[in-house]
């Protein structure tokens, strides 16, 4: 019962699930109780930030509540879990907006299923000057980015997209053809001339 | 004997070497003879292009000999094997220059050990207008690129470097911190504003 449910979690197969079950049997009884409570409570405790749409225990979320963040810059992501990696770069000091997905006609997801009306609202109220489209570099992520560019152009806003290219520390020999092509096209100037 | 030598080849372990040996025993006798001849001949047949420094059977190599290539654009790579992936993008129509390595003080490789005098010569004779530094995005590759920028700036040449960023089809969630930081810094404008 526990094993079959555990093994439905991402990254946990049947073997790991069994290992966890045995661990719970061996560990202090209070540990299993505390874990059970935490799992039961997650849906009550974690809310959606009414500003950016990210997951948070407090509403608004720490980023939206932080007065030190640059409110004129908005980074648009697909899912709440995309915010963490961007924050961990330490490079970004603006706000976020979670779309809640990407435009994907095959899956029946259109612009109306995403948090786009709310995005346009926030752009107005925050007087946003720059938007960074950080949807994933996939077909759907690209299509969504293009849709947003069409929707938002002709406002006095700088719109950009995360750069595509070689990974840091990578090797040309192992780069895929498409990435290398984008890396060439988007080459970074090192001097004028 | 054969197995121990085969297993020294890159990407071939002991098991693959054994499999190859058994294959050669089973296959037509002429196959092993032809393979042996090809292996024996490679060092005689394959030369270094006296223009770009790439491997080639004819000197100059097909790229240097192609009158349709843009002689004003030069892509600088570390090794001959870096040219193939760039060619396979179909995006690049200029010439190449193989440095033959990267500056790496720890390995005792300095600028003099690389084909840099020849590079400066070729820049002059070809009247190069744009240089794309396609050394790998590693510490040594970056250092070599910076060295070349310092050496070549103040000539009327546009110098750029392959873009760093997310791989095409990739996912923010799985991107490493450094790559994501470069992807943010190098974001591509999608509109003015």
Image (cartoon, coloured by chain):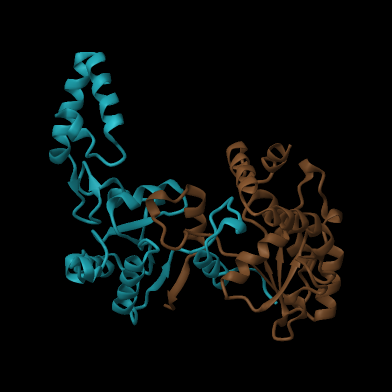
Chain colours: A brown, B cyan
Q: Nearer the viewer, residue A63 or A186?
A: A63
Task: Farthest residue to the bottom: give it.
Answer: A68
User: Residue B106's x, y, as percent?
Assistant: 22, 69
| Number of on-image labels | 0
Residue drawn at 43 percent across, 46 percent down = B88
Q: Which quadrant: the C terminus of chain A?
A: bottom left
Regarding residue A11, the answer to whether it shows in the image is: no
User: Residue B56's x, y, as percent?
Assistant: 23, 45
User: Residue A18's x, y, as percent?
Assistant: 61, 39
Examine the rendered structure and indicate whether residue A166 appears above or below residue B121. above
Q: Nearer the viewer, residue B71 or A50?
A: A50
Is B137 positioned to the left or the right of B102 in the image? right
Residue drawn at 26 percent across, 30 percent down = B17
Regarding residue A42, the answer to whether it shows in the image is: yes
Examine the rendered structure and indicate whether residue B170 appears above or below residue B112. above
Q: Which quadrant: the N terminus of chain A?
A: top right
Residue drawn at 26 percent across, 70 percent down = B124
Q: Nearer the viewer, residue B21 or B38?
A: B21
Q: Nearer the viewer, residue A124 or A2?
A: A2
Examine the rendered structure and indicate whether residue A30 appears above or below residue A131. above
User: Residue A161's x, y, as percent?
Assistant: 63, 65
Residue drawn at 28 percent across, 77 percent down = B151
């Amino acid at each position: 019962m526990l094993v079959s449910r555990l093994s439905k979690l991402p990254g946990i197969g049947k073997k790991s699930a069994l290992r966890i079950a045995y661990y719970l049997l061996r560990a202090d009884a209070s540990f299993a109780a505390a874990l059970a409570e935490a799992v039961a409570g997650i849906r009550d405790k974690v809310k959606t930030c009414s500003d950016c749409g990210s997951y948070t225990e407090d509403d608004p979320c720490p980023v939206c509540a932080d007065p030190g963040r640059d409110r004129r810059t908005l980074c648009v992501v697909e899912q709440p879990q995309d915010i963490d990696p961007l924050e961990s770069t330490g490079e970004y000091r603006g706000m976020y907006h979670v779309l809640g997905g990407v435009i994907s006609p095959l899956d029946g997801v259109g612009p109306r299923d995403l948090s786009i009306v709310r995005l346009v609202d926030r752009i107005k109220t925050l007087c946003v000057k720059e938007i960074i489209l950080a949807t994933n570099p996939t077909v759907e992520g690209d299509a969504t980015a293009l849709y947003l560019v069409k929707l938002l152009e002709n406002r006095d806003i700088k719109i950009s997209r995360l750069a595509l290219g070689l990974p840091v520390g990578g090797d040309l020999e192992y780069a895929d053809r498409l990435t290398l092509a984008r890396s060439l096209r988007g080459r970074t100037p090192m001097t004028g001339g």
